[in-house]
Amino acid sequence: MKTLNDFNFENKKALIRVDFNVPLDGDLNVTDTNRIEAAKPTILKVIEDGGSAVLMSHLGRPDGKRNEKLSLKHICSKVSGIIGVDVKFIEDCVGEKVESAVAALRPGEVLLLENLRFHKAETEGDKGFAKQLAKLGDIYVNDAFGTAHRAHASTTIVAEFFPGQKCFGGLLAKEIDAIEKVMRTGEKPVLAILGGAKVSSKITIIENILDKVDHLIIGGGMTYTFVKAQGGQVGDSICEDDKMPLALDILKQAKEKGVKVHIPVDVLAANDFDNNADTQVVDVDKIPEGWQGLDAGPRTLENFKSVILQSKTILWNGPIGVFEMENFAKGTIAVGNAIYEATQSGAFSLVGGGDSVAAVKQFGFENKVSYVSTGGGAMLESLEGKTLPGIAAILG
């Protein structure tokens, strides 16, 4: 696996695929700089070696048409501020003007190209478009884990034009390493905590990780499909009745593979899906009609904490309750605290997948776990056992 450290970029132009798909407010100001900050070490390595960096990214979904609101010019000053270098900008990503701007770059300079997705050829994985992009660098660096599951021109096809001159950026290398630790090389016991609303969205992950983990915690809305499948009463809780046979099959597979499955034993139930609803703690399999489970109960959280603290490798994907509502966030916070405690004691902890990452940020756990993945869809596909095209292109 070639990384940045396998190259010296002196007098070289690095064509770097970054993920600057960042949120903008109504005034087109960046509201979350995490993805820019994550790319900083890669860019600095190139320019500190005495090379120049050509940055390419997408922003939003302009569907192959120019959209001024989605121009990367709006983030250029923010990128400059974070990197500490005055970043130049050009209003296209291919063509003679772009090639001239790249040719004029001196060592230590950084150029940000316009939104790749202003060209339909980007998302179509067009080879001709990729060839045009390839003219802009001597070495290709992919540092965009968030788009590694897409076979787009800039993430996958362009790599074909850099035989022996392509590598993973610092961020992408870290992402690959973190997933490897959970799926293959992690110290045992290995624990996966899977939450979220639906079993259907996690089926392939569960089936793929059963061979890799020693413990599986089921939380969030998925709980009630498993409980009802085993004959429990779940009241008005979210439940995928058509997935109940699958839930039973997962439990059977886990037992055959020696994986201990931990399902909530009690829940905080509410008489409405509302932060101010009436609540009561009830056994998970005895939720009254008219009530729905919205968070894990106290006995469950004690059980979960005990499992977390005995684990050496921990994957967390999905919240434990409806954390967006303050009164039903306690379970997610408690699990976060237990993972922090385990991490402090030497466990490796990886958080990935949209809602769990949002929860980690909301409750200030970002620096209390070993690694927070930057790629939602890419992370999930990795956990499902899929080979991501953006990764395969560098390895090939």
Image (spheres, rainbow, N blue to C red):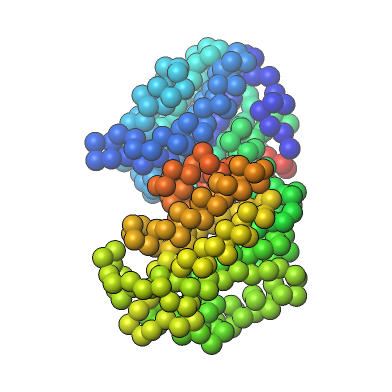
In this rendered view, identify the residue nearer to me: 257 or 110: 257
| Residue 118 seen in render | no
Q: What is the x, y in percent for residue 187? A: 74, 50
* Number of disc labels: 0
In this rendered view, identify the residue nearer to me: 183 or 313: 313
> If the image is split into quadrants, where does the N terminus sit?
top right
In this rendered view, identify the residue nearer to me: 48 or 316: 316
> If the image is split into quadrants, where does the C terminus sit?
top right
Q: What is the x, y in percent for residue 321? A: 43, 63
In this rendered view, identify the residue nearer to me: 104 or 57: 57
Quarter location, residue 210: bottom right
Residue at image point 71% right, 68% down: 259
Outermost residue, left direction? Answer: 27
| Residue 134 seen in render | yes
Quarter location, residue 303: bottom right
Q: Is residue 120 left or right of residue 344?
A: left
Q: What is the x, y in percent for residue 275? A: 29, 64
Q: What is the x, y in percent for residue 111? A: 46, 22
Residue at image point 46% right, 48% down: 360
Residue at image point 63% right, 54% down: 309
Q: Is residue 340 above or below residue 141?
A: below
Residue at image point 64% right, 44% down: 345
Outermost residue, bottom direction? Answer: 231
